Image (cartoon, rainbow, N blue to C red):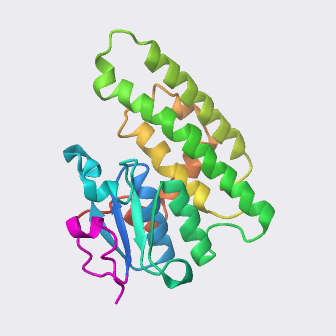
Amino acid sequence: MADLSAFPITARWPARHPDRIQLYSLPTPNGVKVSILLEELGLPYEPHRIDIMKNETWTPEFLSLNPNGKIPAIIDPDGPDGQPIGLFESGAILLYLADKTGRFVPADPAGRWEAIQWVFFQMAAIGPMFGQVGFFNKFAGKDYPDKRPLERYVGESRRLLGVLEARLEGRDWLAGKDYGIADIATLGWVRNLITFYEARDLVAYDTLKNVPTWLDRCLARPAVQRGLTLPAAG
């Protein structure tokens, strides 16, 4: 049985199954990336619900695994050379799990880097911009008298959706011919933008053709549907 006692986070969120990957997350657009990929891979894992509304990511135990205080994070008891490894940053975790299993990322170097660049595109552009739309359209930012920030982020989000729309012209998936980590990284953010963030009309989503059909293809996958609801319990 794996010994995870070197990871202080396990004192607050004990591992009932220490031989499984430990997932510390919440069903946010970043959090579901990892749960979706774990479901797609069929890897045994144990989810721990981290309540960001109770500031649980800022506890010493969580910060010991992710000093940036954000979900998701994982511990893999069977890491490199068979030793446990802790990881944070959703994009890094996607790449780690894809490399560990040899799935959902192309094996050839050119295809691999094509996929990685679209994961980075989501991390650097899609996530930050769509998240700001959510803040200024639905959360505290909606009460700001100055609407220029909302207009700025809505305009940039429309532009980014246009990049996705062009990329998906004549293709089913964002990178290569198969569904992979670039799609997994992006789908939750597009879904949230038009549902939870209530920005469907703001970003003129229904004028798009390729992005909606791509999102439907993603959401039709049973593993995606399972991953979107995890972790449901701590």
Viewed as shown, does residue 150 lie left or right of 159? Answer: left
Query: Is residue 234 visible to us here?
Result: no
**Residue placed most toward the observer, 46 or 164:** 46
Q: Which residue does the image show at 33% across and 22% down from the upper left? A: 141
Quadrant in the picture for residue 103: bottom right
**Residue placed most toward the observer, 61 or 107:** 61
Q: Quadrant of the C terminus?
A: bottom left
Residue 11, magenta (yes or no):
yes
Q: Quadrant of the N terminus?
A: bottom left
Taking the view exactly as shown, the residue that stands out farthest to the bottom is 1
Instruction: Please say if 157 is above or below 97.
Output: above
Q: Position of residue 54 (x, y in %)?
A: 19, 46
Q: Position of residue 178 (x, y in %)?
A: 67, 64
Taking the view exactly as shown, the residue that stands out farthest to the top is 145
Viewed as shown, does residue 202 lie left or right of 178? Answer: left
Query: Is residue 212 visible to us here?
Result: yes
Q: Position of residue 4 (x, y in %)?
A: 33, 77
- For the stretch drawn in magenta, the main secondary structure is loop
Instruction: Please say if 209 is above or below 50.
Output: above
**Residue placed most toward the observer, 8 or 161:** 8
Q: How many marks?
A: 0
Instruction: Please say if 197 is above or below 111.
Output: above
Residue 127, magenta (yes or no):
no
The residues colored magenta run 1-19
**Residue placed most toward the observer, 89 or 85:** 85
Q: Position of residue 27 (x, y in %)?
A: 34, 54
Q: Which residue does the image show at 38% across and 66% down from the upper left? A: 226
Quadrant in the picture for residue 136: top left
